[in-house]
Image (spheres, rainbow, N blue to C red):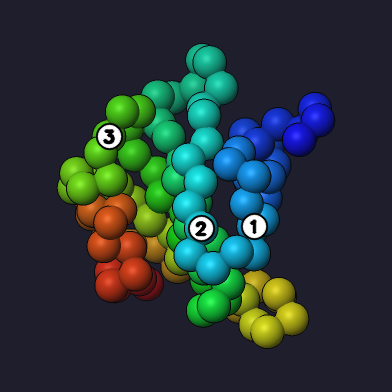
Amino acid sequence: MGNVDPVLNPRVRTDGAQPDDPATVVTLKVPPGSNGTIERFDFTSTTNVIYVGYAPRGAATSAPVWIVKEVTFDASGNPLSSLWSAQNVIWDNRTTLIYS
């Protein structure tokens, strides 16, 4: 991976998979001195959606402490919408949440 920092570039995978692999998930580290939150990414190329979740550091994916953003893309990879879930949702339920 060289010197590319996945915190600064969320398209860089930390596990060797490519960002356009179906249903791939990445958890990125938060730089020291940040506000204590973590970001989690789910690249779902089969549905042209990326889910981005934010939660307190150390939160389980099954804990109702997340807020999730759903970004949809057209077939060419152009962003179409960026919608948010309610607060205090469960990351594991991200594909069935209501976004507005």
The amino acid beneath tag 2 is: Thr
Q: Position of residue 40 (x, y in %)?
A: 45, 45
**Residue at image x 41%, y 50%?**
53
The amino acid beneath tag 1 is: Pro
Front one among 9 and 24? 24
Which callout, 3 or 1, points to the residue nearer the camera? 1
Locate the C terminus and report the quarter of the image it occupies.
bottom left
Which residue position holds label 3? 59
Say few, some or many: other residues with alpha carbon within 10 Å of mark 1 (under 14 / 14 to 19 / 20 or more): some
Which residue position holds label 1? 19
Image vertical order of residue 54 relative to residue 44, above or below: above
Image vertical order of residue 52 relative to residue 34, above or below: below
Q: Which residue lies most toward the bottom here?
A: 75
35 lies left or right of 6: left
Image vertical order of residue 15 relative to residue 18, above or below: above
Q: CA distance from mark 2 to mark 1?
A: 7 Å
First in sequence: mark 3 or mark 1? 1
Q: Position of residue 90 (x, y in %)?
A: 23, 53
Q: CA distance from mark 2 to mark 3?
A: 19 Å
Question: Judging from the image, what secondary structure is the residue with disc 1 in?
Answer: loop
Which residue position holds label 2? 24
Q: Which residue lies most toward the right here?
A: 2
First in sequence: mark 2 or mark 3? 2
Front one among 55 and 62? 62
The amino acid beneath tag 3 is: Ala
Dot 2 and dot 1 residues touching (CB under 8 Å): yes
First in sequence: mark 2 or mark 1? 1
**Residue at image x 64%, y 57%?**
19
